C-alpha cells in the first residue's frame, strides 16, 4: 500500500506537524514502508490469538479515592507564557 | 411547514449521556473534583499533562461504573482497557483524552421507560469511563481564550443508547429515567446546571417502513430536559423539510441555541478514525474480579422500577402516586418513614406528601432533602389526623404553622387549641341551638330537601371553629333532625 502526498498532508495536519512540501514524497515513501510491514503481518492467521492490550502481562492497580494533591497553581503558572485571573491564556480558539 | 408531515416519517433517536461520577478525586490523579473552586486550583501535574507523569486509576470510579452496569442489567467486562482519543484543543493539554474504545467496562444493557402509560425498553449499547476536559472561557481576555483546568480529569461515565427512541418525548423519558437512576445509585449528583449530566442526541428521520437509517446529525451538549425536547423537535422538522424538498442531510455536529430555539451547524464532524484511538500504554488492562462484581451486586439499592412496583403492592398506591413518590430516593424514604411513624393509612400519607408537602416545596423551589418539615415532624401531624385529634382541614392550618417553625404538630395544636371537640355534650349543645334557631331549614329538611343538611353541617363546623369531628357531627345531626 502506498500513501499519496495528500495522505501525508492530512496526517501532518491531524498531528499538527509543520512539514516542508519538498519532503512530502520522502515521508510518503517511509510511511508506506511501515504500512507494507503491517500488510505483511496481516497475512498471518491470528484467529486463535487474543489481542494484546499491553506488553506487560499485568493488571492495573487501582488508587483509593482520596484527594492527595494540594493547590500548586502559583508554581505551575510561573512557567506559563501568559496567565490572567488564574486562567491560562491561549490564542483564541473559537471556530 | 406542517407537522403532519411526520405521519410519513419515522424519527430515530439515540442518546449519548455524560454523567459526572461523584468521586472525591479525579479519575487519574489525586486532585479534588469539588465544583466551583478558583480556576486551576484543582489541577495537578497529571491533569495539566506535564511530561513524565503517569495516570493512576481511581478505584471508586471503577466501582461506580460497575454499579451502573449492574443496575441496567448489563454485561460487565471482566477485562477492560483504556484508549487515547487524539485531538487538539487547548482545554485538553495532553493532546488526547483518556477514554475507552474497544472493551468498555459496561457492555450491552437496557432501561425501561414509560411514555403515555406505555412501557418501552431502550437498549443501552455500552457505558465507558473517560476523563473530562477543561473549560475554555472566550470572553474578556483581549482576543485570547482563558483556560481553567479544574474540570480536566473529572471522571465521566458516557452512556450510549441504541437508536431505539422514536420521538422527542421518548428521549426525554429515557433521559429522566437515567437521571433518576444515577442519583438512586449515588454515583452522580446529576446536577445539570453544573454540567454533571449532559446529553448529545443523534437524530435522523426515514420514510415510514424503510429499514435503513437516514443520515443523522448530532446535537451536542444539551443540559436540560426541556431543551432536549425542543432541540430534537427542531432538528426533526429541519430534516423533514430538507428531505421533502429533495435535499440531502449533511452528517454534522450542531449546537442548540435555546434563546432562538434552533440548532446551528458547529463543524463538519471529523471521521471517527481521525481521532486515531489506540490503547493507552500508560494504563494496564483493568480486571473486574468475580468477587468484586458479586460484592457490588449485593450492595445495590432497591432500584426505582422495583420500588415503584413494591409501593403499588405494599401500600395500594395508584400508578401516578407511586411514580411520583419513587422519583427520588430521598422522597421514597420520606414517604416510608412517615407511613411507619404515623401509623396513618398509606394512601393518606401519599396524598399529603404529593399534595401539601410537594406543593409547598415546589413553591419554595426546594428539594425534599431540604424540606423545612422533617419526616418525623410530618408523621407527627398525620398521626393526629389518624387518631381524630384534628380534621384534615385543621391539619392544613397546622402544616402551615409547622412550615414556618420548628414546633411539633402537637405543640402547635395545643398552643392554638385546635384539637377536635371530643366532648359529645358540647357538640350536642351546639346542634340543639342551631336547630332551635333555624326552624325554616329544619322544616325544609324534614319535607325531603336533603341538600339543606350541608347547611347544618356548615353551621356546626363554623360554631365549633372547625374543631368538631365531621363524622360525629353528621351522625348526631341526622339523629336530631329525624
Image (cartoon, coloured by chain):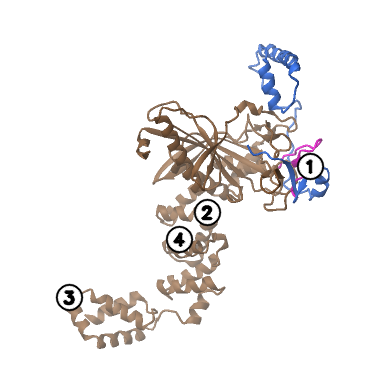
Chain colours: A blue, B brown
* Residue at mark 4: B354
- The secondary element bearing badge 4 is classed as helix
Above or below, comparing residue B180 to residue A27 in the picture: below
* Residue at mark 1: B45
- The secondary element bearing badge 1 is classed as helix
- The secondary element bearing badge 3 is classed as loop
- On whether disc 4 and disc 2 are found on a single subunit, the reply is yes
Range of residues picked out in magenta = B40-58
Residue B236 in sight = yes
Give the Cα distance between marks 3 and 4: 40 Å
Residue at 72% over, 34% down: B95
* Circle 2/circle 3 CB separation < 8 Å: no
* Circle 3/circle 4 CB separation < 8 Å: no
Q: Which dot marks residue B448?
A: 3
- The secondary element bearing badge 2 is classed as loop
Give the main secondary structure of the magenta stretch. Answer: loop
Q: Which chain carries label 4?
A: B
B367 left or right of B120 in image? right
Q: Which chain carries label 3?
A: B
Q: Earlier in the sequence, mark 2 or mark 3?
A: 2
- On whether disc 1 and disc 3 are found on a single subunit, the reply is yes
The picture places residue A20, in percent across and down from the top left corner, at 76, 20
* Circle 1/circle 3 CB separation < 8 Å: no
Amino acid at each position: 500500500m502506498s500513501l499519496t502526498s495528500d495522505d501525508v498532508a492530512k496526517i501532518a495536519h491531524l498531528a499538527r506537524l509543520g512539514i516542508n512540501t519538498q519532503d512530502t514524497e520522502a515521508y510518503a515513501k517511509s510511511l508506506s514502508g511501515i504500512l507494507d510491514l503491517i500488510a505483511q503481518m496481516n497475512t498471518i492467521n491470528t484467529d486463535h490469538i487474543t489481542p494484546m492490550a499491553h506488553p506487560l502481562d499485568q493488571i492495573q492497580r487501582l488508587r483509593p479515592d482520596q484527594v492527595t494533591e494540594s493547590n500548586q497553581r502559583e508554581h505551575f503558572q510561573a512557567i506559563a507564557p501568559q496567565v490572567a485571573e488564574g486562567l491560562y491564556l491561549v490564542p483564541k480558539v473559537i471556530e | 411547514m406542517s407537522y403532519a408531515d411526520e405521519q410519513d416519517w419515522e424519527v430515530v433517536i439515540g442518546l449519548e449521556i455524560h454523567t459526572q461520577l461523584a468521586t472525591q478525586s479525579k479519575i487519574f490523579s489525586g486532585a479534588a473534583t469539588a465544583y466551583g473552586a478558583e480556576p486551576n486550583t484543582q489541577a495537578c501535574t497529571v491533569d495539566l499533562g506535564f511530561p513524565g507523569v503517569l495516570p493512576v486509576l481511581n478505584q471508586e470510579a471503577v466501582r461506580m461504573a460497575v454499579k451502573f452496569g449492574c443496575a441496567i442489567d448489563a454485561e460487565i467486562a471482566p477485562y477492560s482497557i483504556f484508549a487515547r482519543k487524539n485531538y487538539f484543543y487547548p482545554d485538553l493539554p495532553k493532546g488526547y483524552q483518556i477514554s475507552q474504545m474497544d472493551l468498555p467496562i459496561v457492555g450491552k444493557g437496557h432501561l425501561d421507560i414509560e411514555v403515555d402509560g406505555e412501557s418501552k425498553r431502550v437498549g443501552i449499547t455500552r457505558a465507558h469511563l473517560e476523563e473530562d476536559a477543561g473549560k475554555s472561557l472566550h470572553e474578556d481576555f483581549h482576543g485570547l481564550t482563558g483556560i481553567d483546568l479544574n474540570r480536566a480529569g473529572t471522571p465521566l461515565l458516557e452512556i450510549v443508547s441504541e437508536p431505539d427512541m422514536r420521538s422527542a418525548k421518548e428521549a426525554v423519558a429515557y433521559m429522566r429515567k437515567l437521571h433518576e437512576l444515577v442519583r438512586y445509585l449515588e454515583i452522580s449528583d446529576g446536577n445539570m446546571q453544573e454540567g454533571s449530566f449532559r446529553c448529545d442526541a443523534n437524530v435522523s428521520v426515514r420514510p415510514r417502513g424503510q429499514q435503513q437509517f437516514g443520515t443523522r446529525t448530532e446535537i451536542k451538549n444539551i443540559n436540560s430536559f426541556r431543551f432536549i425536547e425542543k432541540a430534537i423537535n427542531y432538528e426533526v422538522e429541519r430534516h423533514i423539510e430538507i428531505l421533502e424538498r429533495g435535499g440531502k442531510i449533511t452528517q454534522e455536529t450542531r449546537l442548540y441555541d435555546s434563546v432562538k430555539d434552533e440548532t446551528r451547524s458547529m463543524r463538519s464532524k471529523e471521521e471517527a478514525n481521525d481521532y486515531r484511538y489506540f490503547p493507552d500504554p500508560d494504563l494496564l488492562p483493568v480486571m473486574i474480579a468475580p468477587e468484586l462484581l458479586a460484592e457490588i451486586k449485593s450492595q445495590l439499592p432497591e432500584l426505582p422500577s422495583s420500588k415503584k412496583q413494591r409501593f403499588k403492592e405494599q401500600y395500594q398506591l395508584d400508578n401516578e402516586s407511586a411514580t411520583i413518590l419513587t422519583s427520588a430516593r430521598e422522597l421514597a424514604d420520606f414517604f416510608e418513614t412517615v407511613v411507619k411513624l404515623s401509623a396513618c393509612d398509606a394512601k393518606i400519607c401519599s396524598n399529603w406528601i404529593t399534595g401539601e408537602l410537594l406543593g409547598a416545596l415546589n413553591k419554595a423551589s426546594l428539594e425534599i432533602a431540604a424540606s423545612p418539615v422533617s419526616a418525623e415532624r410530618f408523621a407527627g401531624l398525620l398521626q393526629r389526623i389518624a387518631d381524630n385529634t384534628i380534621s384534615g382541614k385543621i391539619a392544613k392550618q397546622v402544616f402551615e404553622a409547622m412550615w414556618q417553625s420548628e414546633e411539633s404538630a402537637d405543640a402547635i395544636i395545643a398552643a392554638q387549641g385546635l384539637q377536635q371537640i371530643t366532648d359529645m355534650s358540647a357538640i350536642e349543645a351546639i346542634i340543639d341551638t342551631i336547630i332551635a334557631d333555624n326552624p325554616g331549614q329544619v322544616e325544609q329538611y324534614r319535607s325531603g330537601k336533603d341538600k339543606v343538611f350541608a347547611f347544618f353541617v356548615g353551621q356546626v363546623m363554623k360554631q365549633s371553629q372547625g374543631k368538631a369531628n365531621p363524622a360525629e357531627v353528621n351522625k348526631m345531626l341526622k339523629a336530631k333532625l329525624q
